[in-house]
Amino acid sequence: MRAGHASRTAEYNALFRALQSSLPASRRLFEDPLAQAFLTWPLNLVARLTVVPGWREFVHWFIDRRWPGMRSSVVARTALIDDWITTCIGEGATQLVMLGAGYDSRPYRLSCLHELTVFEVDHPDTQRAKQRALHHALSDLPTNVRYVASDLNQGQLETAMAGAGYRGTTPTIFLWEGVTNYLTEAAIETSLQWCSRAAASSVLIFTYVHRDVLTNPGAFVGTGRLFASLAKAGERLTFGLDPKTLPDFLANRGLHLERDVGAAEYRQLYLKDAARKIRGHEFYRVALARIGKPAAQADAAAYPDRLTAKERLGASR
């Protein structure tokens, strides 16, 4: 990320959510009414033109050709994480800590979060840009959301959160989406150590990239153009993990892995038949881990990969 500028990848993710939200209600996986508010020129124009017949389909085609699998991966993982968060809240979580919040709009669009204390932690440059956009889009910012300016790569997390009123004894959801792959190994260690000291049964939901994409990117479809775009934005990939060793990696840091889903899998869950034709971004994964000892009945059924349409509608109202 370039000094003095908001994250460009966060803005592209907002564009993908805006495009998804412009679909007819029967076809979209979620609705994000704020996504377009975070877009600057020319991406804001791209999103606004979706009302023109055929434009949205052309944009989908163009993006998918330029960065194979990226748009569909972001859209499907957004829906998956929405569902996991809803399940966590049903289990009693009362805090949400968003590590590297970017332009995530969940605190504003998911009603199940409106009664929780939410901490948005992010780099000061991105956070300032987000708050400007929110002030333009909303008449008032929600009182349950606290903004914590902190650069995770600088090891400032513990001090910043203590000053923001974070309670380490309260069951908490930690959300770390689209972040770990841009951090240093030292920042990963410091952040995980801090999370592991949370109340027992707290949950960490995080994304990561397969370690092989860093050492052998040619093994994955579409990485050439993706890496070139990331380099231009000053946001190259720096950290990855091996799914085979992830359980031990987390266990050594006080966390128990419960779910680990790759892009091909979660696209299939949410995009169904359309996912069969999609290639690219298979190195991207979403995992869920519990702080401390595993829950007595923690298994795949505890965190369904997908809520029913009725359950999701209730969570987002």
Image (cartoon, grey):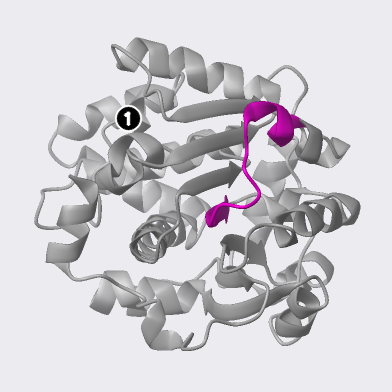
Asked if the stretch drawn in magenta spans residue 164, the answer is: yes
Q: Is residue 185 left or right of residue 58?
A: right
- Residue 224 in the image: state x and y as whole percent: 68, 58
Q: Amino acid at mark 1?
A: Leu
Q: Tell me what residue is drawn at x 80 percent, y 33 percent.
A: 159
Q: Tell me what residue is drawn at x 56 percent, y 52 percent.
A: 170
Q: Tell me what residue is drawn at x 86 percent, y 50 percent.
A: 184
Q: Which residue is mark 1?
A: 34
Q: Tell which of 35 and 168 is nearer to you.
A: 168
Tell me the quarter of the image containing the N terminus: top right
Q: Tell which of 252 and 206 is nearer to you.
A: 252
- Residue 27 in the image: state x and y as whole percent: 15, 57
Q: Tell me what residue is drawn at x 69 percent, y 29 percent.
A: 123
Above or below, 232 against 70 in this view is above
- Residue 37 in the image: state x and y as whole percent: 36, 23
Asked if the stretch drawn in magenta spans residue 163, the answer is: yes
Q: Is residue 103 left or right of residue 307?
A: right
**Residue numbers of the magenta segment:** 160-177
Q: Quadrant of residue 122?
A: top right
Is residue 183 visible to the viewer in this orientation of the structure? yes
Above or below, 291 against 149 in this view is below
How dense is the environment of label 1, judged by Cα within 10 Å: few (below 14), some, or many (20 and up)? many
Q: Tell which of 157 and 169 is nearer to you.
A: 169
Query: Circle 1 — which element?
Result: loop
Q: Is residue 247 left or right of residue 207?
A: right
